[in-house]
Image (spheres, grey):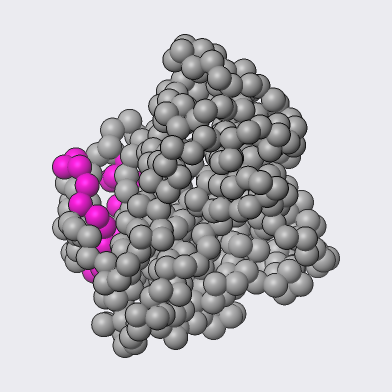
Amino acid sequence: MHTLTSLVDASAQLETWFPAKRNRHRMTLDHMRTLMAYLGDPQDAVKVVHVAGTSGKTSTAYYAAALLHAAGKRVGLTVSPHVASLNERVQIDMKPLPESLFCDELNTFLSLIEQGGFTDLTYFEVLCGFAYWQFVRQHVEYAVVEVGIGGLLDSTNVVTRADKVCILTDISFDHMSILGHTLSEIATQKAGIVQLHNSVFCWQQRTEIMEAFQRAARQKQADLEVLHTNYAPQDLSFLPPFQQRNFQLALHAVRAILRRDGGKLSPQSMQLAAHITVPARMEVFQMRDKTVIVDGSHNQQKIHALTEAIKAQYPSMPVTIIAAFTRSSRPEHRIDGGLKELMSVANYMILTSFIVDRRSPHPSLDPQVAARLCDAAGYNTYAVVPDPDAAFDAALARTEPIVVVTGSFFLLNHIRPLLLPAA
């Protein structure tokens, strides 16, 4: 029996599952399906809203869960990665499972799967299985599930219910070594969450993306609904443009669910759902005399949405940006476009790094690599400050009134707690 008593204990225990991820020679759902069958297939015991895409899927998942909760439903939500604490991976009615309950339940779950001989799972498979199992134990009516990577072979993609609702958010280039090198290939992987007779919702996107979505819908005899224009029933101007888009997509899907299953949303409940805080998505704090914006944008499409939001909401205001990125084999291809987007709004940039557990498959990019890309672009108003604490202090010491912290969630995990009220 495990004796985890805190989220720190739980995180340390779960990190022991990291190495197995590197030992896999191919992505497969075989391990996950076997685990789910052993657990009694909890993923098929509740109604599921499955969210995949490149950009906006976390926010869309949060909004979908908030809208269902606002309609009086009991809702589970699982997202990845977590931002502040591990128990964000299992939320009930928009609140992370309390620490003591999370640890008690995880103790039971880990003992259960070890008794079943499941010793070669990955970190994400364990957490995904735990979330599905926990949603049944917490008696939710709906589980809103964010995909980890891709869709077709993602560990979340084990739901077989025909009434699953799929939300496909905006598609761009990301995780290309896994998902493919064209938008068509990537969109095909994302649309792999669509199963027989599901309902699918998306915004109109580029032709090659839509062809992949339509092909998946035909193959699975699924109903595909495509949003073409803004149809918000109320003012969403308080949200950044990209969040308005995410909220409307979630609202369209949830309204369809409520028409099917029963339930209503009042204008007041919709407003409450639209005002929820999505952690690390254009999240705003005040510290000293600064407005600090925390946003986990780590690819060019997401960073473009962030910079457009900054221009719209803080026009002509000077900005300092702190950025760190995850190491990759070809950083010039992965981050160069995003860096150039940041340069378009940054009066000054501080390039930093982050520290992760030595077993983590996501080490930090050396900020000197990003510095060389800045030099190549002719951008020289930057500093390299490898220590993230020192980087944050340096940003707060500058004169720019806006400080933006962006890039890898591992950087955000480090800096965001400094902005939260003391417990």
> Which residue lies at the image location 35% right of the left edge and 80% below the top edge?
267
- The answer to whether residue 110 shows anywhere in this view is yes
- Which is nearer the eye, 271 or 226? 271
Residue 301 placement (x, y as % from top left): 37, 38
Residue 335 placement (x, y as % from top left): 47, 27
> Which residue lies at the image location 44% right of the left edge and 15% below the top edge?
377
Name the side, left or right, on which 189 lies relative to 222.
right
Image quarter hosting the N terminus:
bottom right
Name the side, left or right, on which 20 lies relative to 179.
right
> Which residue lies at the image location 32% right of the left edge and 48% below the top edge?
170
Residue 196 placement (x, y as % from top left): 26, 65
Query: How many discs appear?
Result: 0
- The answer to whether residue 133 shows anywhere in this view is no
> Which residue lies at the image location 56% right of the left edge and 57% below the top edge?
279
Name the side, left or right, on which 266 lies relative to 386.
left
Q: Which residues are magenta?
A: 186-208
Image quarter hosting the C terminus:
bottom right
Residue 194 belongs to magenta span: yes
Residue 85 placement (x, y as % from top left): 67, 58
